[in-house]
Amino acid sequence: MEVRPGYKLTELGVIPEEWEVIPLGELASVAAGGTPSRTNAKYWNGDIPWITTSEVDFYKINHAEQFITKEGLNNSAAKLLPSGTLLMALYGQGKTRGKVGILGIEAATNQACAAVSLKHGASREFIFHFLASQYDAIRNLSNTGNQENLNSSLVRSILILLPPLPEQRAIAAALSDVDALLEGLTRLIAKKRDLKGAAMQQLLTGQTRLPGFRGTWEVVEFGEIASIRNAKVVASSTPPGTQCVELESIGGEGCGRLLMSTDAAGMSSKYSFKKGDVLFGRLRAYLKKYWLATFDGVCSTEIWPLIARDARLCGGFLHLLVQTDDFVNAAGVSYGTHMPRSDWSVLKRFPVQLPPVPEQIAIAAVLSDMDAELSALEARRDKTRALKQAMMQELLTGRTRLVAPHGGTP
């Protein structure tokens, strides 16, 4: 393999000559935290923030969901860590393992978090960004068994590409600027979602009426005005190129976005849906998975394609109804313990406050405008995330230099 001048071949690939490959354990001490006894009330609800892996998510950690007392700290393996300490999730639910964060507060952690305390000669922000870029590789380091975990020894063994300190700081500053933009967009999106939620609460209950509308609303059962498009299909009966929407294809937590779709070839039995149907995830309804279909296709039988069955209901208003907390709670009355599924016999009796169709259309238009604004912000955030990934690929490997090597030009 030919290596261009100024670069060298290492176990992590081709890197600039003045960069080093160093195990993290030579740059930092690594230690897990601990959990005070849950049976001793004196150990809990104090004033010491206690961080778990659910709060480690590639950003600065400024808040804790749980708190312990000094007595709890002193009688457990938990340690009080200074602000600025790097944390890595050793294990946890789903994709938690391998995530990193930086403490923005003084706090303790549980045993599922590794505290990475850097020595001199390494930029904390640079190491944070490098570890974040190695997320998939770090997850692959974990042990095999019933639950794949990392441990402190494995974390110490992680190889770090280390430029000279001035270049570390320059790279970290560039990536941190993008992080600041991402955090700002995330806060703005959360604020806009809260505003939409408040508007829905007012408009869908009649507490606030749009100009030009008055009169009483009727109360009907959901099953009177809506139904499931109960049209099951199999692969042999679908045209080539038919798109399939699985439950994981739809964004959760009320984002209302389709993340992906796949070709229906080779699929098992599915529901057919049409453009304008409201797809609602019936498995674990609390995940709030819904989508207003923008094309014809097929979907998992874990998704209900909901349609208006009565002229008193318009599709846009149906889309709003499934987003309300009251509807999601009603859909949460389920059967099945491990795989809870919504029960139509219960949900069809859900009471709906139903305005006249012209008012439904007006309400849907107002909230659709808010959705469009949210979608634009989310698209901007997605593009910014993609930009950061591209920057990480260039800057953290030395392909693009921000600091001139050996007095030359970057």
Image (tube, rainbow, N blue to C red):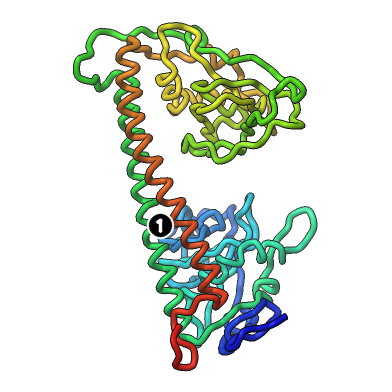
Residue at position x 69%, y 24% in the image: 239
| Residue 52 image point, x, y percent | 54, 58
Report the front residue among 228 and 324.
228
Residue 265, by quadrant, is top right
Looking at the image, residue 190 sits to the left or right of residue 149; the answer is left
* Residue type marked 1: Leu
Residue 71 can be seen in this image: no
The residue that mark 1 highlights is 182
Q: Please tell me which residue is depicted at 51% across the width and 30% down the height of the picture.
A: 291
Question: What secondary structure is found at the residue carrying circle 1?
Answer: helix
Left or right, 31 with respect to 208, comes to right
403 in relation to 87, above or below: below
Give whichever of 71, 320 is nearer the camera. 320
Residue at horizontal 61%, vertical 67%? 134
Seen in the picture, residue 336 relative to 67 is either above or below; the reply is: above
Instruction: Look at the image and tell me whether residue 399 can be seen.
Output: yes
